[in-house]
Image (cartoon, rainbow, N blue to C red):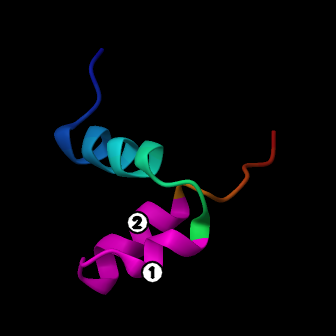
Amino acid sequence: RVGSLQLLSRLAVRAALTHESDVQLLPLPPRLRALVAALFTNTIR
């Protein structure tokens, strides 16, 4: 199954960044920056 375009777009942006702090430099609305920043958080398994 293929992910949604929204998820794939966020993953592409995440892959282009090297540090979580770089997210704040993106010219995106705060809500979109928060979604991308959430991809940097570690998940508990």
Q: Dot 2, crowdedness within 10 Å: few (<14), some or many (≥20)? A: few
Given residues 10 and 3, the one toward you in this image is 10
Quadrant of the image occupied by residue 28: bottom left
Residue ID at (45%, 50%): 14
Residue ID at (42%, 47%): 16
- Three-letter amino acid code at the position of disc 1: Gln
Magenta stretch: dominant SS?
helix
**Residue that numbered label 2 is attached to:** 35
The residue furthest top is 1
Q: Secondary structure at mark 2?
A: helix
- Three-letter amino acid code at the position of disc 2: Leu
Whether residue 42 sits left or right of residue 10 in the image: it is right
Magenta-colored stretch includes residue 5: no
Give the quarter of the figure containing the N terminus: top left
**Residue that numbered label 1 is attached to:** 24
Whether residue 24 sits left or right of residue 27 in the image: it is right
CA–CA distance in space, label 2 to label 1: 12 Å
Q: Which residues are magenta?
A: 21-38
The residue furthest bottom is 30
